[in-house]
Amino acid sequence: MNPRTAVDCGYTWVAEWEPHQATWISWPYRETTWPGRLHTIAPVTERIIRTLAEVETVHVLGGPSQTFQAASMALAHAPNVHVHNIPTNDVWIRDYGPTFVVHPLKKQLGAVRWIFNAWGNKYQPYDDDAKASARICRGLDPNGLWRFTESQELGQAIEQFASSLVCEGGALETDGQGTLLSTTSAVITGTRNPRWSREQIEQEFQQQLGVSKVLWIDGGELAGDDTDSHIDQLVRFIRPGAVFAAVSSTSDDSNAPHLAKQYQVLKECVDAQGRTLEIVPLKTPPPRLIQGRRVPESYCNYYMANGIVIVPQFGYRSTDSAALGILKEHYPDRDIVPIDASDFILGLGAFHCATQQQPAV
C-alpha cells in the first residue's frame, strides 16, 4: 500500500455533478475498435467536444503524431479546446485517465493514478494508455491550468498519488457524500488484483478517494461488455441517495435476469449517510447486433458537464425518447443533449467511457 495517500494530504473525490473546470477526451483513430465504422466516429467525437466547449474547457489527447495533426486541424478554430500531443492506444480515457481529486481547504487540484492494464490484459498494446495519466498530470498546475509546453516544463505540477491498485475509472461512481459504488467483477479479479483482498481494496478506495462506504453492486451484466461490468454502464448516482439503474426493456433480453438481480441488490443497500437508495429504472434498448456482435447499450453511460447532460442515443425511438424524458425529469436545471451513439457503441463503450471530468477548484 502507498503510505502517502490523497486523503492523508487533504484531498477528496467529488461527484460528477459538481462544477467542472474541464473535460478530458481522446481523439479516435483505432480501426480495430470500430471496424468498418471508424469514419463515423470522428464527427461524433467532434460534436461532443464542441458541445462541451460551450460550457467548459476541453482537453483533447491527440494520440499518435498523424492523429494529433488530424485532431488539431479539425478543432483548429474551436474556442475553449486544447489539443495535446499525448499518445494513446484508444479513446477510453475514463478508464486510463487520472481520477481528479480536490483539496477543499487549499482549493487545489490533485490526482489519483491507478494502474491500467487494459481491463485485465484483454487488449494489446496499451502502453501509451497506461502512461497517459502521468502525462496529463505532468502538465497541470495546482490550480488545474495546463502549463506544460514542449520547450518548458511546468514548475509545479499537481500533487499525484500513484496507487498500486489496478483499476479503471468506469468501475467507480460516487455521490460525493462518502458512498462509492463499484462491482467486484471489475476490480477483485485474478487479472487485475490477484493479491488484494476485498477489505484491502475498500481501504485503498477510502484512503485515495475519501469515501467511507463501498457498496458492491453485483449481479448486473450487459452482454457484449468487455469491462467485466463497469458500474457506469449499470448504476449511476442521480444525486445523493438516488440512483438510475439499468433494466431490460424486453423480457426475452438475456440481460434481463442479471439486471433484475442487480435491482434487488440495490434495494438492500444503505449508503454512507444511512439512507436506503431511491432507485429509478432506466430501460435499455432491445438487444442489437452489429456485425454479428451484441453491443452493450445503456443510457446510464451519459456524461454530466456544467449545466448539461450528454445522453447516448441508440436509434431505438421508444427507449431513446423515454431515457431523455427521465433524465430531463431528474435534471430539470440542465440541458439534456442527445447525441447519436449507434455506431460509437460498436467500440463497446459510450460517452461516459470516453470522457473524464476535471473538477473546479
Image: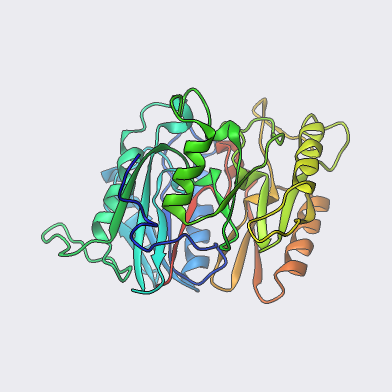
Q: Residue furthest bottom?
A: 333
Work out whether residue 5 or residue 260 is closer to the camera in this orientation and state it. Answer: 5
Task: Quadrant for residue 285, please give it.
Answer: top right
- In the rendered view, does 48 fall on the left or right side of 117? right
**Vertical arrangement, residue 332 with respect to residue 250, above or below:** below
- In the rendered view, does 334 fall on the left or right side of 66? right
- In the rendered view, does 73 fall on the left or right side of 21? left
| Residue 145 x/y as whole percent | 30, 69
User: In percent of the image, x 34 and y 38: which residue is there?
Assistant: 130
Count of all numbered marks drawn on residues in the image: 0
| Residue 47 x/y as whole percent | 52, 60
User: In percent of the image, x 58 and y 63: which residue is there?
Assistant: 177
Residue 313 visible to an observer of this rendering: no
Of the 4 image quadrants, the one containing the C terminus is: bottom left
Work out whether residue 28 or residue 353 is closer to the camera in this orientation and state it. Answer: 353
| Residue 106 x/y as whole percent | 33, 74
| Residue 18 x/y as whole percent | 53, 69
Colouring mode (rainbow / by chain / secondary structure / one colour): rainbow
User: In percent of the image, x 41 and y 49: which residue is there?
Assistant: 27
Task: Quadrant for residue 252, please give it.
Answer: top right
Residue 222 visible to an observer of this rendering: yes
Of the 4 image quadrants, the one containing the N terminus is: top left
User: In percent of the image, x 56 and y 34: which residue is there?
Assistant: 186
Work out whether residue 105 or residue 319 is closer to the camera in this orientation and state it. Answer: 105
